Amino acid sequence: MGGSEADLRPEIAIAWRRAELSGLDPGSGVSAEDFGEVDRGSTLMVAAEPVLDVLAGQLRGTRFSVLLADHEARIVDRRFGESRLADALDDVLAVPGHRYTEEVAGTNALATAFEIRRGITVVGAEHFLDPLKGFCCYGHPITHPVTGRLAGVLDVTGHAADATDLLQPFLTQAVRDIEARLLEGSSAGDRRLLAAYRARTARTSRPVLVLDEGLMLANQAATDTFDPAAARGLARELQGDEGSCRLPARAGEPVDVSYTILPGTRRAVLFEAVESKPFRPPVPRNRQLPSLVEALAEHRRRRSRLLIHGEPGSGRTTAALALAGPHPVTVLDAAGEIVAREMDHLVVIDGIHLLDSAAAVRLAHLLDSSSGWFAFTSCPESELSGEHAGLAARCTGRWRTEPLRARRHEFPLLAQEVLRSQGSSARLSTGAVSALSRHHWPGNLAELAALLRELGRDGGVITTAHLPDIFRRPARNLPVLAQAELDAITSVLLRCRGNKVHAAEILGIGRTTLYRRLKELGIE
């Protein structure tokens, strides 16, 4: 196969895993699953055709081709510098009408650029399927400048022996030319709409939302705050060209906003949170809360034994206390001596993973002969072994508390709720929220609470300038699987107190591979 997965670049290794999960066999050919008609009159084709003509002229006499795919990754056009390459592309079904996704073609620059929404180079053995290993390819997504949506993918493909880095800037410029023509081809109303949105968001960090028929533009604050479906329904009922109203939110009370009907558009509406008072995001509602409440209520009714497991600081003890509800509760620290005694109310053993083996055995014997109501908290259940795993096995229920890094989509609301619970009048700027949400948070909610307690003492707006240096690193937009890998490696390193030899053993990889991944993922 031309090299092991351990030798691959991170983005290629992750793409290989996606291909494996799709059930592809490296030795198989490209699957002919989805052929369709090509619309030669589409907006993308009209914008791209003159650019493709120029590219074909520039590539004349070379062993490279240009492929254009649409927003579904369906190939809609091909141009060749040398006609003999057409037969080679036909053999791997890189032909107009074929939807060339990773599910059917594995890792390649066209399909993978479509998947990850950024440019990528795939050369020779980096292709997942053996029939594609003879090619080199360079792919780059085309983004519509008005809608911000993926319009297509532009790809340059040739023989692996001709691989060169010189085609990357060549391809990037061609994509910019197509995007410029897409903007020119947009209606005057769409261009006015885009200009108004950019002008408004350049002046404020408050939520800004623009709605038109079939189109929505929103900054991050608006995405986190507003309910788009409800906003669209309200937009149809507005009277006059401008005014104020209350816009439904994703959580909490509606938000006071001003609105403007943008002139020169079909009837686009621009909503912006009002300035009459500092904007405060709605009070968060943990998306796990309804199911957690229901689960705890059921365990409380049955007085069943429950294991609440997760990382330190992720809310294990809080959830255990919530299990008692209105009833009395006794909390025993597993690090101390646990006295065997019968109680008629909930007994929480906090941190069973800290018990020594003898204490764990004694507690297991107690449970076997007791009808008492117990709840245990522990590290993630997968990390328990021996007597501690046997102790956990005596619980009939499980609840896993999510680490903070797995709740990044909730971070703006979670952070504001922590400040509110501390009685602080401070609020976080959009930049500060973005910077904090990128942190790994090994201490989870407890670490966040400690930081915000210090930052929020004096009230006001907490900006990135107020944050410690560790939180002010440049943004890293990792693909979902790469972020999951980073989280897994960091979690194991924390468990091993930074010992990379032990971490590599737990992860099941070689030390050399771990060192390489640490460098590639930027883990210090």
Image (tube, helix red, strand yellow):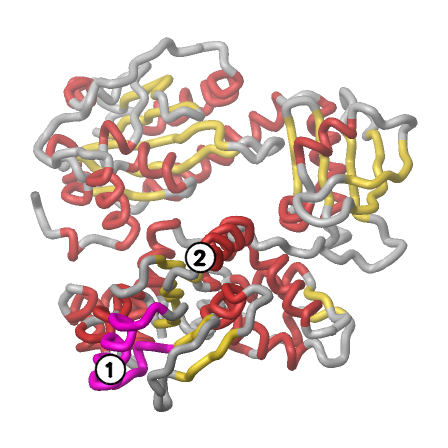
Q: Which residue is mark 1?
A: 362
The quarter of the picture where residue 233 lies is: top right
Kind of residue at badge 2: His
Q: Which residue is mark 2?
A: 299
**Which SS class for mark 1?**
helix
Looking at the image, which residue is at 40% across and 59% down?
A: 399
Looking at the image, which residue is at 25% across and 75% down?
A: 364
The percent coordinates of residue 425 (x first, y second) are: 77, 71
Q: Is residue 107 shown above or below 346?
A: above
The percent coordinates of residue 313 (x first, y second) are: 47, 73
> What is the quadrant of the N terminus in the image?
top left
Looking at the image, which residue is at 39% across and 39% down?
A: 170
Is disc 1 in contact with disc 2, using a CB cutoff of under 8 Å? no
* Magenta residue check for 432: no
Looking at the image, which residue is at 64% across and 62% down?
A: 431
Q: Is residue 26 shown above or below 82?
A: below
Magenta residues, as a range?
A: 351-371
Q: Is residue 143 shown above or below 12?
A: above
**Drawn side of residue 150 relative to residue 395, left or right:** right
Q: Nearer the viewer, residue 264 or 57?
A: 264
**Which SS class for mark 2?**
helix
Mark 1 Cα shell of 10 Å, populated few (<14), some (14-19), many (≥20): some
The quarter of the picture where residue 393 lies is: bottom left
